[in-house]
Image (cartoon, helix red, strand yellow):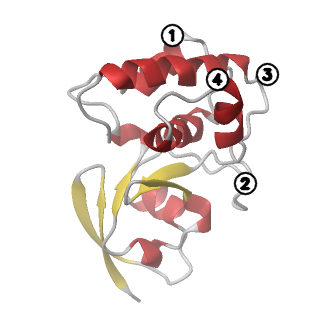
Amino acid sequence: MPRITVTVDGVKYEEDVEPRLLLVHLLRERLGKTGTPVGCDTSNCGACTVMLDGKSVKSCSVLAVQADGCDVVTIEGLGVNGSMHPMQQAFHEEHALQCGYCTPGMVMAAIDLLRDDPDPSEERIRHGLEGNLCRCTGYCNIVRAVRRGAQEMGRAVTMP
């Protein structure tokens, strides 16, 4: 069994993993990062989106062995000193969720979108979130939350 080293939310882990183990299952089942939900296991919904070396990926489409030596940030690793990340706060304030299942992936994808475009248009936000599905909302509040998060992150000192 391969042994990997991965840093998740700032903590370094060494794990023996089956070669076929998905990153999402390593995060949830071995490391207790249950904020990253398993949505579809086929990379269609985006609920399991995390940051892998600074880029958003659907963790159900990445093998744990592919994350060897990488830095992973989950939804649980975004906040600082018990405070929510500005994007998490924006989703809360704009009521950009109903059941909340897609929210972790949406937040992670939104943060990644803002790395390339810190002030995206509504069209750009909708395009940037295309790989993340919400089955409860009409996306209006999600788009509004991303705009608000972009404004707040523009004021923030650091981004993950």
Mark with earlier residue (2, 1): 2
Q: Quadrant of residue 156?
A: top left
Sequence order check, earlier mark of 4 and 2: 2
Point out the tag, 1 or 3, that comes first from the N-terminus: 1
Q: Disc 1 designates what residue?
A: 93
Tell me: 45 left or right of 56. Answer: right
Q: Amino acid at mark 1?
A: Glu
Q: Mark 2: which secondary structure? A: loop
- Three-letter amino acid code of the residue under disc 3: Gly
Crowding at mark 4 (Cα within 10 Å: few <14, some 14-19, many 20+): many
Q: Report x, y in % for residue 48.
A: 58, 50
Instruction: Say few, some or many: other residues with alpha carbon within 10 Å of mark 3 (under 14 / 14 to 19 / 20 or more).
Output: few
Q: Quadrant of residue 7?
A: bottom left
Residue 84 visible to an observer of this rendering: no
Front residue of 118 and 62: 118
In the picture, measured across the screen, residue 95 lies left or right of residue 4, that is right
Q: Is residue 135 left or right of residue 62?
A: right
Which residue is denoted by mark 3 in the rendering? 138
Q: CA distance from mark 4 to mark 3?
A: 8 Å
